[in-house]
Image (cartoon, rainbow, N blue to C red):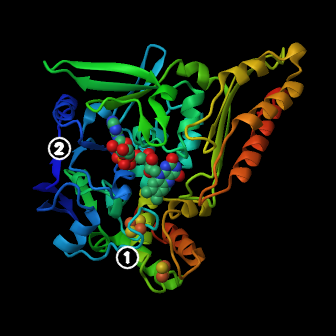
Amino acid sequence: MISFTLNGEKVESRGNGNERLLDVLREEFSLTGPKEGCGEGECGACAVLMDGRLTNSCITPLANAAGREVVTIEGYSRTDRYRVLEKCFAEEGAVQCGFCTPGMVMAAEGLLSVDPDPSEEDVRLAISGNLCRCTGYNMIIKAIMRASKEGKGLW
Amino acid sequence: MVRNYFPETLSEALKIKRDDPETVPVAGGTDVMVSKKDAGSYLYLAGLKELKQTCVSGDDLVIGAGEAYRELLEEPLIPELLKAAMREVASPAIRNSGTLAGNICNASPAGDTLPPLYCMDAEVELSSMTGDGQVTARKLAISEFITGVRKLNKRPEELVTAVVIPGFKKTNGMKMYYEKVGARRSEAISKLSFAGLCLRDDNSKIISDIRFAFGSVGITTVRIRDEELKFLSAKDGRYSDMAEEITNDLDRVLKPIDDQRSTAEYRKRVSLNILKDFLQKCSEGSL
Ligand SMILES: Cc1cc2nc3c(=O)[nH]c(=O)nc-3n(C[C@H](O)[C@H](O)[C@H](O)COP(=O)(O)OP(=O)(O)OC[C@H]3O[C@@H](n4cnc5c(N)ncnc54)[C@H](O)[C@@H]3O)c2cc1C
Ligand code: FES
Ligand code: FES
C-alpha cells in the first residue's frame, strides 16, 4: 500500500509503485479532472500539484507520490483562489473545449503560489508546458494576469 | 509481477542494487516513465534524503543525485552556466521532478546539461555496497562515465550518488556563453546546444583559460581540450586569427547526424557559427 494525502485526505492506494499516478487518480480514486492528452509529459493536461508544485501525473510513478500532498483540480476547486481563476477564465473566454483547462488552472496556481504578481512573460513561461488546441493562449494568459490582480492577497 | 523497492536510506538502496543488480533506478521518472520498456523491478530514489543535499567540500561543489532542476535553480551555489542550461530543459512541471543525475544517466546526445558539465570537468560519484556490507565510492570524469548513446561506464550494482564540480569557484569566475537551438521555446529537445567558458584579463587582454563543448553533434558531447589549448597559444594576443583555424578544425571533427529533429548539415553549420561567435566575443572581451 502506498499512502499519501489526496485533496487534503489521507489515502492509501492499492496500485503498484510503477503505475502512472494519472491512472491511479482517474481509476482508483475516480478523479477525472486530470486528463490524458499525450501520455508523455508534453501537454500538461494531466497536471496536478505535488507538495504545491506542478507535476505531470502521466509520467509520475505512483511511488513518487508516497508521503506527498497531491492536489487535483477537484480539490483545488474548493478554494477561494480557484473561484477567482474560474471567474477570470470564464470572463476572458479562456475556455473553449475545456480539455486543457484543469491543467492550465493547476499551472496558474503553480505560478501564483510562488509569484503572486507575475509579468506576462512569467505567465507565458509558467504555462509553457501546457498545450491548448482551441484558444491560441492569449485569453488564458489574460485570465491569469487578471486573476493575479483581482485575487490580490489570496496568493 | 513487477517488483518495486522503496528504500528509506541510501545504504538500503545500495544493498538492494547489490542483490538485484538489474533493478532500474527511478529518480524523477521523467525518462523512465516515457521509455515504456517494462523492467522486472524498479528502485525508487525520490524518498532518499541523503541524495537531496548540495554542499561545498574543499574546492568541490557536491550536488546530490536526487536534486531536481527546480531545487538546483533556486540554489545560489550552482554555477550560472549550468543554470542557463537547466532553465531550458523541458517545462516547469518537468523541472519540478527531473533530476540532474537522471539527465546524465539517460546519456542522450541531446541532454542539455551535458555541455556545461563537460566544460566544468564535472565528475560523477558512483557508490556501491560490497558483499560484507561496506559502502564504497569512486569518481569518474563525466567524459569517461558516458561512453555512448545510453551507454554508461557503470557497474550494475552501482548508483550515482553525486555530481561533483571540482574547483567550482574558479569556473564561477569565468565568463559564460550558452546557446540551445530547438524547435520552440519550451519542451523542445535540442537540435543542438553549445556551452562555453572564458577567463580573460581585461587589462592585459590575455585569455588564460577557455572551454567549449557541443551537444547533439556526435554520439556523446564533444569537447576537445587540445583545440582549447591551441586557442590559448595564439601569439601576441592574435586570438581572432586562431579562431578561424579552430573553427576549421572543428568542421572536420563534428559528425552530426540527420534525424527527425534536424539535419546533419544544419547542425554542423549552426554549431560552427555559434563557435565563431563565442570565440569572437572571447577575443574582444565582450562576453
Ligand atoms: C516532455 C519531456 C521533455 C523533455 N525535455 C528535455 C530537454 O529539453 N532537455 C533534456 O536534456 N532532457 C529533456 N527531457 C528528458 C528528462 O526530463 C531529463 O533527462 C531528466 O533530467 C531526467 O531526470 P529524471 O530524474 O526524471 O530521470 P529518471 O527518468 O528517473 O531516470 C533517467 C535514467 O537515469 C537512471 N538514474 C536516475 N537516477 C540514477 C541514479 N542515482 N543512479 C543510477 N541511475 C540513475 C534511470 O535508471 C534512468 O535510466 C524531457 C523529457 C520529457 C518527458
Ligand atoms: S498527458 Fe501528461 S503531459 Fe500530456
Ligand atoms: S480549450 Fe480546448 S484545448 Fe484548451
Q: Quadrant of residue B244?
A: top right
Residue labelled with disc 1 = A83
In the rendered view, tell whether residue A10 sits above or below residue B122: below
> Can you tell which mark lies on residue B210?
none
- The residue drawn where x is 30% and y is 25% is B127
Would you say the beta carbon of the disc 2 residue lies within 8 angstroms of ligand 1? no
Q: Residues within 10 Å of mark 1 (few under 14, many from 20)?
A: some
Q: Is residue B226 left or right of residue A153?
A: right
* One can see residue B157 in this view: yes
| Displayed-image quarter of ligand 2 | bottom left
Mark 2 secondary-structure assignment: loop
Amino acid type of the residue tagged 2 in the rendering: Phe
Which residue is more in the foreground, B19 or A154? B19
x and y percentages locating residue B164 in the rendered image:
45, 25
Which residue appears at 43% of the width and 43% of the height? B106
The chain identifier of the residue carrying mark 2 reads B
Q: Chain of mark 1?
A: A
* Amino acid at the residue labelled 1: Arg
Task: Quickly name the residue at label 2.
Answer: B6
Q: Residues within 10 Å of mark 2 (few under 14, many from 20)?
A: some
Q: Is residue B223 above or below residue B187?
A: above
Kindly state the secondary structure of the residue where label 1 is placed: helix
Quadrant of the image for the C terminus of chain B?
top right
Residue B163 in percent (x, y) is at 42, 29
